[in-house]
Image (tube, rainbow, N blue to C red):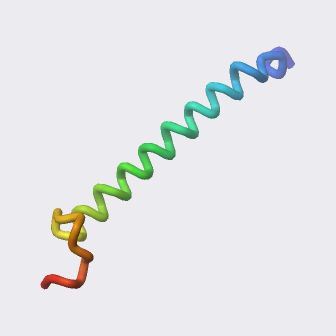
């Protein structure tokens, strides 16, 4: 097909999409960890009640 000719541009676009998704997932994980840790990243969750 014609789409297989542009493997370079499509691969680069796919890489950017995966990179964006990874950054988004990491950001969500960081926010969840901060919320569960009580908003203080220096304290481990469970040391303070």
- Image quarter hosting the C terminus: bottom left
Q: Position of residue 6 (x, y in %)?
A: 77, 17
Query: Residue 8 falls in which quadrant of the image?
Result: top right
Q: Is residue 31 above or below residue 7?
A: below
Q: Position of residue 42 (x, y in %)?
A: 22, 67
Q: Position of residue 20 (x, y in %)?
A: 49, 37
Residue drawn at point x = 50 percent, y = 46 percent:
22
Residue drawn at point x = 15 percent, y = 82 percent:
48
Q: Is residue 17 left or right of residue 29?
A: right
Name of the residue lying farthest toward the right: 1
Q: Is residue 27 left or right of residue 9?
A: left
Query: Residue 16 falls in which quadrant of the image?
Result: top right
Please give the count of numbered marks on the rendered protein. Answer: 0
Q: Is residue 9 left or right of residue 30?
A: right
Q: Is residue 44 above or below residue 2?
A: below
- Image quarter hosting the N terminus: top right
Q: Position of residue 10 (x, y in %)?
A: 70, 24
Residue drawn at point x = 17 percent, y = 65 percent:
40
Query: Residue 24 falls in which quadrant of the image?
Result: top left
Name of the residue lying farthest toward the left: 49
Q: Is residue 47 above or below residue 18?
A: below
Residue drawn at point x = 83 percent, y = 16 percent:
5
């Amino acid at each position: 097909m014609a789409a297989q000719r542009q493997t370079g541009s499509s691969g680069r676009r796919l890489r950017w999409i995966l990179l964006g998704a990874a950054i988004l997932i990491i950001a969500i994980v960081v926010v969840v960890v901060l919320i569960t840790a009580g908003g203080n990243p220096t304290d481990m969750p469970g040391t303070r009640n």
